[in-house]
Amino acid sequence: MNLEKLDKILENEPAFRKKQAFKFVYQDLNEDWEGATIFLKETRKELKDDLSLNIDAEILWAEDGRSAKALIRLKDGVAIETVLMKGDKRNTVCVSSQAGCPLGCVFCATGKNGFIRNLEYWEIIEQVLVFARILKNDFEGERVTNIVFMGMGEPFLNYENVMKAANFFNSKEGFEIAARKISISTVGIVPEIIKFADEGKQFNLAISLHAPNNEIRKKLVIVNDKYPVEKIMKAAEYYIEKTNRKVMLEYLLFQNVNDSKEQAGKLVSLIKRKQYYLVNLIEYNEYEKDESVDISLKKSSKEAVSKFKEVLKEGSVEFSERFKFGRDIKGACGQLAGEQNK
């Protein structure tokens, strides 16, 4: 669904026709241009031929029915994955920004097969459209309420397309999702964090920190050599100054790696203006790693997690724990791999 084709197809139509087309697709969630009787028959045929509303998606539901993973095959045959998480009051779609990932973080399956390409902005939008249709048709007209850029890839290495997609999700022509319900996660690409802060938008910023110092973080996040902890936190402070908004620090807990009370204390010390940060504690989801990885990763014990949280609480650091969605369908944090790209 190359949205840039829409301009060409409708170039001789009145300007309002494009808005009507967007409403037909993204708000009314129609799946066939034949029903778009606002257009002449010839135009509908051209739309069907050049801008098909069909999406090649295989849907896999978790046993608890609270999450689903879509394996989407794009026009060039590349496969990407996206996840729907159904809560009691919100429906969140976790979108991918790249096919594969060039960063190779040792805890994540996405980078295992390397980087394929950046996604175009309409390929990001398409991921939400898949689940928007399912919610409408199978769940009595429910809507997508939240979007997180936390799927395959590093969003800030595909900055322009990610921002185009985020703005479209927020727009009246798109899904009309409030900016504060759209979150963009980065492993810490400092120049783009600065650029993001300067956008003047109300989108949420999440940073995959996972360690309070460089000694541990460089074992988990290869790009830490280029963007160490102190540079990331300085960029986070710049974001806070520019937006007056909180930053989410994502923290995967690994047994005997970063989950000790000592590491929790260092994390407390790292966060200076505690009222502006939320630490999101995440349980590690294991996957079949390459044998060349020189660090043993296992999820933290319940006892270790409890002690870690105690230190954060005593240090007045706000924290939350990420709910475990989709583990049985390999749709949980760090498990998306675009299976058919292997």
Image: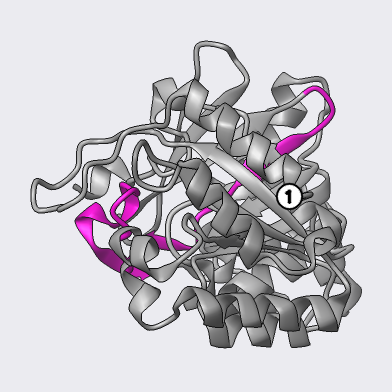
Task: Give the amino acid type for the residue marked by disc 1 in the picture.
Answer: Gly
Secondary structure under tag 1 reads loop
The image position of residue 171, as x and y in percent, is 85, 65
The vertical placement of 79 against 165, above or below, is above
Residue 20 in the image: state x and y as whole percent. 86, 61
Q: Is residue 157 above or below residue 333?
A: below
Sort mark 1 into few (<14), some (14-19) or many (20+) by Cα contacts within 10 Å.
some
Q: Is residue 49 visible?
A: yes
Magenta stretch: give its range: 88-117
* Side of 86 relative to 325 (left or right): right
Residue situated in front as seen by the camera: 31 or 40:
31
Instruction: Name the residue located 43 percent from the left edge and 63 percent from the top edge.
Output: 98
Left or right placement of residue 279 versus residue 257 in this view = right
Query: In the image, what residue occupies the spot 85% across and 77% down?
Result: 243
Q: Position of residue 155 (x, y in %)?
A: 53, 68
Q: Quadrant of residue 192?
A: bottom right
Front in this rendered view, residue 180 or 131 = 180
Q: Is residue 109 magenta?
A: yes
Whole-percent x and y of residue 185?
59, 61
Q: Residue at x 56, y 88 (%)?
A: 191
Q: Is residue 282 above or below residue 166?
A: above
| Residue picked out by circle 1 | 315
Residue 95 falls left or right of residue 147: left
User: So how many labels did they put on this image?
Assistant: 1
Q: Residue furthest top?
A: 63
Q: Nearer the viewer, residue 128 or 184?
A: 184
- Residue occupying image coordinates x 34% and y 70%: 117
What colour scheme does the image use? one colour
Question: From the image, which quarter does the N terminus lie in?
Answer: bottom right
